[in-house]
Image (tube, rainbow, N blue to C red):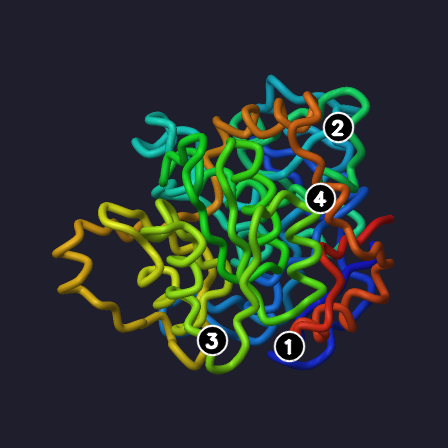
Amino acid sequence: MQAAVLREYGEPLDVTDVPEPDLEPHGVVVDVEACGICRSDWHAWMGHGEWADDQVPTDFVLGHEPAGTVVAVGERVRSVAEGDRVAVPFNLGCGACAECTNGHGNTCLDGRALGFEHAAPGAFAERVHLPYADYNAMRLPEGVAARDVAALGCRFMTAYHALEHRAVVGAGEWVAVHGCGGVGLSAVHVADALGARVIAVDIDDGALERASAAGADETVRADEGVDVPTAIEAITGRGAHVSLDALGRAETCRNSVDCLRERGTHVQVGLTTDAEQGVVSLPTDAMTRWEVDFLGSRGMPPTRYDELLGLLEAGDLDPGTLVGREVGLDEVPERLAAMTTYDTEGVEVLTF
């Protein structure tokens, strides 16, 4: 089968023939119909994460936001059959450890990260293996397109988990979103669906226009010299109730914390680059004085995926509207490289 393979960090992916996925007894093989192209893939392609023992291997297939049809089923699988259309979470739980059985499969003690580690080759490929399918496979509602689910991908489930489960956003609260790429636009859309008042922050007019279309009530263009926290305070009166850093730069993380009101909540979703190497300085005295919470958020437990698919089926979320470009497998290397200069169009999706 054809796949896009990482040979060297920062060099174009190699679109070539690779062996078919091995079918494990607890797994299924999925024929990929669509797969989102995410900034986390860019981080992996660049070789980031060595500082956190989280660097992807080379000679490896990236891609972690697939949806498609089951074409082979392991002998121990009971709840998934050939022909089922499924979404594949990137944070794959084992289904048996204490974290999984308590509803926290995204922090599974023996989990696999699809498209990021040797045990879970990714979905920039015609087919992909899904382990522990009884726990991880998420059936798609009737009539929901694979392209829309790929756009949902890790960005929407990450944004939803961050805002609904971690920060517990309330209707009418001010939510600031720093960085309006894929996960940032998803956070804007999710916060709007939860009834929040949303402020989108970015340096690009096109990104802010897409954020407004996705549900942002206000926008702040973060040009050089602009005091973003002061701008957000002017809009909200006292600062945001919840602020989310979707980019992972030191500046956006600090702006997110500084724009909060008393007892506000910052959620860190964006991963840092090699400039920060996982470490950002914070105003800890002010955070203590005003009881500001700093939360990390990673993906979403597979057991709560039905909440998000339910919103999609009901029409409360429409990730397809954020798709800026559909590409073929041979275009994936170029579109991944375009993220280096932020030269992408909303959410970009590989389709077969």
Q: Residue under circle 2? A: 85
Looking at the rendered structure, the kind of residue marked 4 is Ala
The numbered mark, 1 or 3, whose residue comes first in the sequence reads 3
Residue beneath the point at 36% across and 51% down: 237
Q: Nearer the viewer, mark 1 or mark 3?
A: 3
The numbered mark, 4 or 1, whose residue comes first in the sequence reads 4
Residue beneath the point at 66% across and 39% down: 23
Q: Residue under circle 1? A: 340
Q: Residue under circle 3? A: 226
Q: Position of residue 304 (x, y in %)?
A: 49, 27
Q: CA distance from mark 2 to mark 4?
A: 12 Å
Q: Quadrant of the N terminus?
A: bottom right
Tags 3 and 2 touching, CB below 8 Å: no
Seen in the image, is 76 located left or right of residue 260? right
Looking at the rendered structure, the kind of residue marked 3 is Val
Q: Nearer the viewer, mark 3 or mark 4?
A: 3
